[in-house]
Image (spheres, helix red, strand yellow):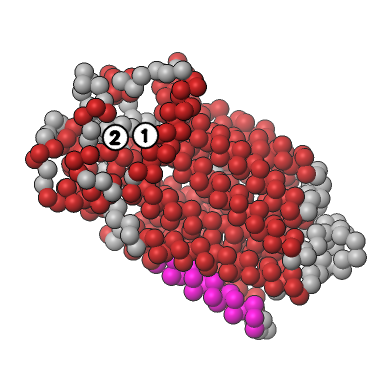
Amino acid sequence: MGGGWNTIISGLMLYFFTTYGDVSAVQAGTILFIARIVDAVVSLIIGPLTDNFYRTRLGKKFGRRHFFLLIGAPLLLVVFPLLWISQQGFWYYLIVYLAVEMIMAMILIPWETLPTEMTDNYKLRTKLSSTRMFLSATGTFLVFFIPAQIKATNSPNAYLITGLIFSVLFAGAVITTYFTTWERKLTPEFLAELDAQPKVPVGKLITDNLKDFGSTFKNSSFRKHLAIYLFSFTGKDIFATALTFFVVYAVHGSESFGLTLQALSIIGLPATVLAAFLMIRKGPRYLFAMSYSVIIACLLALGAIYLIQPSSTMVLLVIVGLAYQAGRALLEFTPWNVFPFIPDVDRIMTRQDRAGIYAAVMTFGRKSTGAVATLLVSWFLDLGGFLKPGSAGGVQLDASCTTSCPLVQSTGTQHVIALVVILGPLLLIAIAFAISRFMYLDPQSHAVLRTEIDRLEAGGSKDDVTSEARVVVEKLTGHPYESAWPEDAISPTVTPVSNGS
């Protein structure tokens, strides 16, 4: 569901709103921007809420993370299909999209913490996250494959049928997750550790949460990780958002072909299996380099195809599309397999369990930059003179079309679409590539870090730290070792326990 929903946002929504929703490109971008910003703010509340939900009766019965999965599934079944009713206009889509985004946040934020909850072992977390990303790649493929097949039948309700199918698939995925995952057990020791954090009034809680969110940026590994994640995923989002426009309006392919081209993401399944192996053997920096190199080469090739427009354009688009989707699968796989280890870096800095706060900041950043990216794409389309279907004086691309018909765009508009789909992602991916060369969190450094945490939790003295552990801790945290494992971070009456207890 996570991969599928984020792919829908980046790859389908802008095209659906402008082609079938009776809204302009700027209006469609505004819907996505407003909803994602509101949702990003809500996400900052949900993360700490799940961290502290163990205090409630519902949290103790269903789990502080799992309760939100349980109530999210039925809400998806009811609300999600409403998003795909055509010709409803700006305000309808804004309200429904807001509702869907908040439901998704309520599910995805606690879900993102589960690998950290389930085990503290690097290889086991990688296997869990790899399995998760394998299924996510399946969702990414289905998001384009299903509407492409339904659209090919010329059904006037193709997207509504798609929405109904995905509401069932997504809700089923959430329920499956609820029954097949677990959280760190609320042992008396763990409860004592959690309860050592004092209860505070709501106003002060919000203020403290904002401080907590800011404190995550003291974590050097997280700063780099977040920058890599946001630059690369925003580049990917821009590409997916603009690709169908590019195929339909710039190289004059069919809408069904544009969706099928995105459905080549099926190549992400074997690519994810390879990535899981390389993540353990080589580490994230190797995967970042492989992913970004492939994507940059594909974007340059796409630019050459547009400029030359050979007779074999569609065949070449398929070849480039397959290579790009393999690189994209590695791009999506790597940050979310690094993330479960970020809370361990924080743990040696704070002696606290703050996976929910890190997940909230990640989600806030992702949604904020994704919202801005979509809005920029819509602005560029509008500034380039994009004509939405039904515009007066427009000439149809397909004479047999009777409703929501794509129109022939000017040469200048076609150039703008090509620049958006190629140049924007190219710049952002190149920045992420440069930052990734300075990422030091990998299997080897995490093993040293985890050993040092376990030693300190067992009562070991900081004075007895090995030179290797000192160097690793300082590289990963960005601070002198002396500031690690602060004595005043936890009540002296509480006995800290291992994250694997």
Q: Label 1 amino acid? A: Arg
Disc 1, SS: loop
Look at the image and give the residue range highlighted in magenta: 290-308
Picture disc at residue 422: none
- 309 or 153, nearer to the observer: 309
Asked if the stretch drawn in magenta spans residue 334, the answer is: no
Q: Which residue is mark 2?
A: 350
Q: Are marks 1 and 2 in contact (CB under 8 Å)?
A: yes
Q: Quadrant of residue 315?
A: bottom right
- Hey, which residue is sitting farthest left in the picture? 464
Residue 203, position as x, y percentages in the image? 50, 22
Looking at the image, which residue is at 33% across and 49% down? 220
In the image: residue 150, left or right of residue 366: right
CA distance for labels 1 and 2: 9 Å
According to the picture, the residue beneath numbered tag 1 turns out to be 354
Could you tell me residue 479's position as x and y percent?
26, 46
| Residue that lies at the very extreme toward the right in this rendered image | 393
Choose top left, top right, bottom left or bottom right for residue 62.
top left
Please tell me in which quadrant of the rendered image residue 495 appears: top left
Residue 222 appears left or right of 155: left
Task: Mark 1: give few (<14), some (14-19) or many (20+) Cα within 10 Å.
Answer: many
